[in-house]
């Protein structure tokens, strides 16, 4: 698939060369680990600070944890289980244990604070959670204020040190201090080692392709995050497609550094290599020097990342000293790759950065650039089994090449709807030529060779270093500040992050002349995820509003854009 040439734009999607249909396994995602453990039992499935976990061990740990979830955690088929931790082997074990227990994985960003985490508990109706020890206090604060009927009934806690080598002096790279720091646990929480040590057997695995498997959350323009319902089949599509498109094999080694709670990291840093029998080399947080050593030491072949990481990596004074010859694929999405950086990457590694495009609703990529003919700052070609179109967002009439419209997609990787939100689900889909298409909310165009380009967004979203920040959610949290009367969140240019978050705030009368922008920023920093809190705050007397009283955020955004252009 990598070497397939793009089709002419006038060919129907079903017959375009380079986009053959994939035949998906009619099994659950758990079956992927089971097969790899049977085929490659002694092969390293995970490498982490010098410690290897074989596929056999990974399978055994996930099975034992599934038994604990069912017998002690009260988890039943279809129950939602929150997974709340940084990248570590325990995340992978927990993910597959939840699937083995016929339950649903609800991955939560570990940067979220108590107020944000509480929403996942109540909205998903979760009764169990698995978290790292450093976040257990956040879980306790988040759930302590809930009514007893809404609280988590079971909490399993792991220390990051549980997965580290027993003798740190033999570790390849010394683990950072935050991985070995001890943290207090809430009363009643079950230790990870106790759950695994119980060696409880789960009941028969009954989940099939059309059962719920994973529910990542995404935000929209109307408030708090929404759960995206994904089945084993919808996740399997991009797993099988990713393996084929990127040529992942048992001989491959993938650097897993994108967050596993996010669909790109989840698929390319975990699910694809497990399906193909490749080795996952884990890095819990981005560190360009450690990443370089891991690529060289473990002969990394596949690295899915974002442009911000590439910029930082190439800025290292040590990059020229590293043996990076093993790399065969480097690519990702989240933001456009600057031309100058792409040129330097080709000069340093001899590789093109393969940009792609996808959403939580599509379980990662719907479009990817082919290795044989990538285009810069381009979404790429539609992936296998996908029908993508560009339509007029009002009339829904399909547009010819190079005309800008809304990108809509239809395929097995598309989610089934938003959890508990019928209206939002109905608005997200449209019937077109006898099929159901998901409205991405992104404006783009298709060129004459079938490549897609994004030009703007219908949805109100800020893209900060590849992290999607949804203004309505930040506004909802800012209104909790006692000095904030009104707030509007917009994007502003940032030389490193691409975009960053700006808050335009009207202060309450009692706070005027007393509260500073720095006060608001510090409060937000304490109450919001690191990528989400406003980096700049501007005080105004009033916010522009329409005749119906709605804040005219677009007017503020356009003014900010114009100021950025004027300032160069």
Image: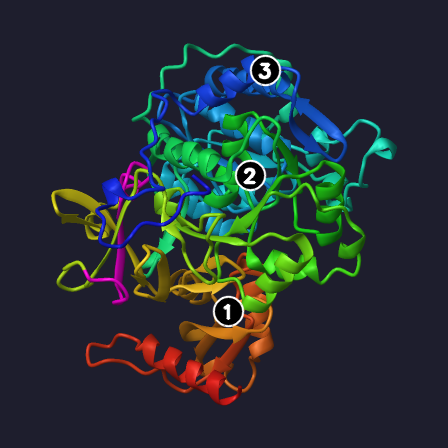
Residue 394: percent from the left, percent from the top?
A: 16, 64
Please name the predominant secondary structure of the magenta segment in the image. Answer: loop
What's the CA distance linking mark 2 and mark 3? Answer: 20 Å
In the foreground, 208 or 8: 8
Mark number, residue 499: 1
Front residue (pair 159, 42): 42
Earlier residue among tags 2 and 1: 2
Instruction: Name which residue lies at 30% across and 76% down.
Output: 551
Q: Position of residue 124 (x, y in %)?
A: 37, 39
Q: Which residue is tagged 2?
A: 269
Which-is-in-front pick, marks 2 and 1?
A: 2
Instruction: Say whether residue 85 is left or right of residue 460.
Output: right
Residue span colored magenta: 399-420
Could you give the CA–CA distance between mark 2 and mark 1, rounded to whole angstroms? 25 Å
Residue 337 percent coordinates (x, y): 52, 62
Q: Residue furthest right?
A: 169
Q: Which residue is mark 3?
A: 60
């Amino acid at each position: 698939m990598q070497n397939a040439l793009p089709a002419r734009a006038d060919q129907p999607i079903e017959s375009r060369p380079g986009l053959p249909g994939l035949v998906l396994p009619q099994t659950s995602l758990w079956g992927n680990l089971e097969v790899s453990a049977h085929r490659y039992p002694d092969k390293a499935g995970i490498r982490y600070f010098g410690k290897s976990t074989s596929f056999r061990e990974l399978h055994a740990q996930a099975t034992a944890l599934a038994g604990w979830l069912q017998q002690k955690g009260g988890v039943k088929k279809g129950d939602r289980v929150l997974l709340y931790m940084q990248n570590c082997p325990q995340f992978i074990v927990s993910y597959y244990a939840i699937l083995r227990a016929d339950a649903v994985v609800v991955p939560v960003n570990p940067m979220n604070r108590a107020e944000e985490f509480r929403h996942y508990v109540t909205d998903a109706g979760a009764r169990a959670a698995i978290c790292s020890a450093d976040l257990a206090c956040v879980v306790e604060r988040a759930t302590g204020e809930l009514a007893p009927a809404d609280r988590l009934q079971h909490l399993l806690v792991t220390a990051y040190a549980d997965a580290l080598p027993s003798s740190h002096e033999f570790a390849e790279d010394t683990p950072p201090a935050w991985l070995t720091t001890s943290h207090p646990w809430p009363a009643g929480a079950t230790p990870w080692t106790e759950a695994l040590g119980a060696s409880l057997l789960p009941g028969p695995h009954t989940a099939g392709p059309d059962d719920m498997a994973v529910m990542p959350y995404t935000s929209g323009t109307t408030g708090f995050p929404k759960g995206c319902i994904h089945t084993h089949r919808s996740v399997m599509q991009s797993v099988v497609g990713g393996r084929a498109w990127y040529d992942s094999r048992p001989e491959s080694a993938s650097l897993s550094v994108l967050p596993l709670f996010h669909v790109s990291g989840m698929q390319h840093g975990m699910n694809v290599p497990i399906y193909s029998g490749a080795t996952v080399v884990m890095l819990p947080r981005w560190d360009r020097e450690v990443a370089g050593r891991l690529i060289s030491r473990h002969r990394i072949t596949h690295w899915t990342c974002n442009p911000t990481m590439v910029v930082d990596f190439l800025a290292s004074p040590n990059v020229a000293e590293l043996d990076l010859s093993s790399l065969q694929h480097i690519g990702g999405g989240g933001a456009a790759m600057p031309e100058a950086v792409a040129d330097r990457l080709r000069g340093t590694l001899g590789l093109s950065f393969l940009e792609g495009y996808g959403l939580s609703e599509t379980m990662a990529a719907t479009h990817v650039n082919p290795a044989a003919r990538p285009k810069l700052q381009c979404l790429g070609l539609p992936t296998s089994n996908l029908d993508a179109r560009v339509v007029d967002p009002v009339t829904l009439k399909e547009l010819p090449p190079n005309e800008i419209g809304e990108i809509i997609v239809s395929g097995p990787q598309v989610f089934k709807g938003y959890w508990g939100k019928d209206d939002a689900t109905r608005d997200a889909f449209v019937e077109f030529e006898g099929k159901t298409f998901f409205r991405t909310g992104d404006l783009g165009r298709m060129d004459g060779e079938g490549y897609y380009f994004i030009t703007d967004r219908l949805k109100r979203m800020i893209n900060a270093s590849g992290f999607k920040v949804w203004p309505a959610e930040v506004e909802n949290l800012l209104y909790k500040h006692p000095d904030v009367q009104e707030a509007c969140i917009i994007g502003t240019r940032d030389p490193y992050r691409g975009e960053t978050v700006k808050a335009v705030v009207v202060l309450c009368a009692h706070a005027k002349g007393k509260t500073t922008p720095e006060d608001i920023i510090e409060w937000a920093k304490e109450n919001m995820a690191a990528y989400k809190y406003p980096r700049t705050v501007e005080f105004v007397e009033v916010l522009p509003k329409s005749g119906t009283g709605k804040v005219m955020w677009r007017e503020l955004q356009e003014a900010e854009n114009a100021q950025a252009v004027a300032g160069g």
